[in-house]
Amino acid sequence: MTPTDAGPPADVLRPHAEQRHADELAALARADDRARPPGWRLSPWAVVTYVLGGELDDGTLVSPKYVGDRRIVEVAVATLATDRALLLVGAPGTAKTWLSEHLAAAVSGDSSLMVQGTAGTSEDAVRYGWDYARLLSEGPSRRALVPGPVMTAMAEGRLARVEELTRIPSEVQDALITVLSEKTLPVPELGEEVQARRGFNLIATANDRDRGVNAPSGALRRRFNTVHMPSPATAEEEVAIVARRVDEMGRSLGLPEVSSGMEEIRRVVTVFRELRRGATEDGRAEVASPGATLSTAEAISVLTQGMALAAHFGDGVLRPADVAAGVHGAVVRDPVADGVVWREYLETVARDRDGWGEFYRACREVGD
Amino acid sequence: MLGVRHHGPGSARAVRAELEDFAPDAVLVEGPSDADPLLSLVGGLEPPVALLAHAPGGRGGPRRSAFWPFASFSPEWQALHYAHEHGCDVRFCDLPASVSLAVEGDGDGGNGKGARPADPLAELAAAAGYDDAERWWDDTVEHRSRERGSAPPPSPFAAIAEAMTEVRARTAPGPLPLHEASREAHMRRTVRSALRAGHARIAVVCGAWHVPALLERPKAADDAALLRRLPRVTAETTWIPWSHGRLSASSGYGAGVRAPGWYHHLFTAPDRPLERWLSEAARLLRAEGEHVSTAHVIEGVRLCEALAALRGRPLPGLDEAGEAVVSVLCEGSALKAERVRAAMETAERLGRVPLSVPRVPLQRDLEAQQRRLRLRPEAEPRDLDLDLREENGRARSALLHRLRMLDVDWGVPLADPVRVLGSFHERWRLAWLPEMEAAVVDASLWGTDVASAADARTRERAAHAGLTDLTALAERCLKAGLDGALEAVLDRASARAAHVADTAAFMDAVPPLARAARYGDVRGTGSAPLRRVAAMLLDRVCAGIGPAVSGLSEEAAAGMCGAVEAVHRSAALIGGASERSWWEALVRLSTRTGVPGLVAGRVHRLLRDGGRLDDGELLRRLSRAVSRGSDPQRAAAWITGFLGGEGLVLVHDEGLLHLVDEWLCGLDGESFDAVLPLLRRTFGGFSNGERRAIAQRVRTIGADPRTASRAPEADLDRASAAMATAALLLDRETSTTSGEP
């Protein structure tokens, strides 16, 4: 666990949110004169401002982290302020993890107390484990106990995050019930318990595409307020999200400057939206939808890859040929079924669109 | 001077409190001043109601109507109600409806807002840092009177007047549009006349926008000059029932509110509106089978309060409540939440007006009939099953049909999946929508009672209708019991038929007439003239059908096939010589060349089912139709037409099955490919059981007939009892529904 106040080493690949935006958080903390819930670094209003962006009275510009419905963020923050746990549900790539990281960074200044849910996540990861060498030599003692992120968050009054809740086996999920209802974590081996301090809360994310994996039990569900994360509502909104993230990622990966991306970004977003919705943006024609989710996050990765191609192998301008392979790869997961869908889309929609000729030819080349 | 927002519960409470406090001796309310006589009726009304102003538009003038809706949470309504309870003088102060209806180009029909340079509330809201004007008004005015247990809040009206003066000076510095100016002139004039009448304490309840205009005092002569030039029409005003659905902004009502149900709740809930609202949502969700506990409601309330605090709102509002319902009560499922949202936010209710309100004669007649037939107009749709053999059922049906003739679709006939062939039942879906009141008023043009109005309307329609429309009209006349109009329609149909030489049009015209004749039998009205016209048309069909079916495209053939069927059924209903000539026409058709396969196949089937074609001859025809020499496409169409959606005939007629089988096996690959889609469509229409039975039969083709499974011989002894009952039933059926095919 990195002490969050110290700056990260310059060569860290992906600094935590609170490190990346340390200056914004500091400015907000200075400007924030509203009531802060116990244990919170900022007031709920400042948290919302941090996430959605805005300009402070002292002229500091806060960059928007999440672009979308203000109400979603407000409900999420209000939930955390009521000491109810927050469950963010949505299709893959709808910024669930992104939002949870930024909320944790803003509320407790620490987004690193995170349990990554997988099929192999054990109770130890959720609660606590043991340092076996010490356990064997000294017997059960506080010093031999290795606290998990949730336990640390409870003890320190911070936010804990559980990613991909539904991937965790049901019996392990249910270990959270006591934590959320009693706000205590018993350690029977020591005859002790850890009581949560004010400011503790939990943000979980879950993917509703794999609802069947390990649906949370009713008892656990009742401890959460659920917020459904939608796909971006309009093409413009989605283009804005993609453009900003691609830009940020390009900079953090140290890619050379690549120009004239907007047109390609708009095109990729259009392709993804149309295939996702099963209809063209003007609503005139229906298209088949492939099996892939085609989330905003995938559009971002396709474009970042395209930027890398253009920077290193192209002429420094993002061209249709740079994104064609990426789009093809994202859409065609199943070579047979999705291949047909993609070819149909190219022939019926892309071919006749103004200014799409180069893109169409590039995609045809990749496909053949 | 009480500036309000139309339909705001907080405004309504504040108005009420202010009136109690001020104890005026006269109350002036924004509304059409020629509706003053109606104000004495306020005590008997049950909101939501609306003032209906209606210009009958005789002599070429435009027919228009306008509404001024009032809900129990409307400040205007509270003012009216206060005046009624305390017996003080009450008047409307806006322009009379006769003027506002005459003013052209007034988009929103004078429903209280009028054309306005900009949205004044948006200006104020923006100044207060809100992006949503509605929400700003809610926060500052509507929600303020809801604080629990505290002393009543100070009156907001002085502040509103001041703010509005400022806004008006900024957004509309120049002269107002004429209509707006004259409305306000009229309001001022009403105030003056109230003062002259000796009232000292006058309360004016009007839209906040108008308050500054009423506070300034231009010369009376100027206002009079402004009002003198206004055009006028004759207008009648009355109270009509209104509904919450029509109050909501989504119904297109200009001054509408987003969620009438929420406002109604705010106004009626004695305390803790949020808790009550969420409990109600939980109750509705439980009724839908969801598990929503009290703990959910508690957490929902907490979330609302946290959200309101976060957003800096004084109290949680509808937005917060809606978000709590989604996030807590429905555990994130917007779909579930949507199910209760609509029901709660609109909270459909229909107002009531007493019988004593002035009504157009047609309305009075309709009400009398509704009472007599015990059909209450209700907003919620409900289904009604009428038995036409009973006096009451017939009368109800006739009333509903007559209203439909007058474009008042109170009842809409439902297709009955079970008794589609039954002729003595009618199923209706009834829903009385507020605009029907207006439709009734509109229809009063045609007559003073429902029967005569419907009669006149029908005759008018008949004058312009083509043949097909005429026969459909005849059927409707009969159902509506309009015998006089029926004769006129039939005369018109005969006259028209003489000029028409289109057999297809006749074929479309025959079935409604034949059905009408059958309904006539059921209803005990005279059906002889109907039969006469139907028979005449059928004769003409028989004469022209040969050329009519020749050389049709595949699509047209499918339509023609349906038409032939329909006429065939009608022929049985018409009976007599015309039925015989129809059979002859079918026989002629069966041997005619150039008839599309589909139609030819169908004709053969009809002849076979009618016993007009023996099996040997049929097999010969079939084998010829499907023989190698004929086009495989046509052969397949022939089979399709012949089987016509039911495959049992293949199961029971071995000869037929053999023929089809032989034909199919004999096709070469290319022709097989050509007919396959057609056959697939044909066989796809059969039920699973039929297909299985056919498949079983096909498997035994060619097997030794002795070893092939055979249906067991019927045991006549055991069947006799059932057969006797069946015979009895059939007999009864034919005697009660004479003319049933």
Image: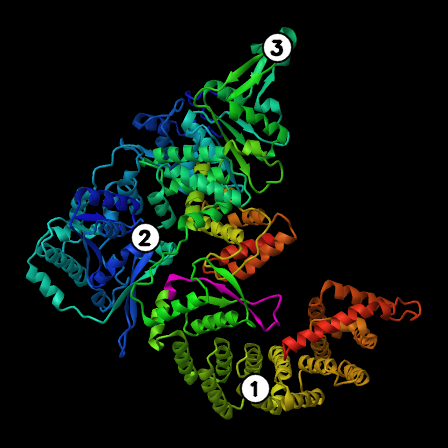
Give the Cα distance between marks 1 and 2: 54 Å
A194 over B353 or under it: above or below: above
Q: Chain of mark 3?
A: A
Q: Nearer the viewer, residue B731 or A7?
A: B731
Callout 3: 10 Å neighbours few (<14), some, many (20+)? some
Name the quarter where the C terminus of chain A is drawn. bottom right
**Residue B143 x, y percent position in the rendering:** 30, 40
**Residue B420 covered by magenta stretch:** yes
Say whether residue B76 is left or right of residue B282.
left
From the image, tell me which residue sits under label 3: A140
User: Does the residue at mark 2 contact the one at mark 3 (Cβ under 8 Å)?
Assistant: no
**Residue A208 x, y percent position in the rendering:** 56, 41
Q: Chain of mark 2?
A: B
Mark 1 vs mark 2: same chain?
A: yes
The answer, for residue A173, to whether it is visible in the render is yes
**Residue B473 x, y percent position in the rendering:** 48, 80
From the image, tell me which residue sits under label 2: B71
Magenta-colored span: B415-436
From the image, tell me which residue sits under label 1: B531
Q: Amino acid at mark 2?
A: Ala
Q: Determine the secondary structure under disc 1.
A: helix
**Residue B548 covered by magenta stretch:** no
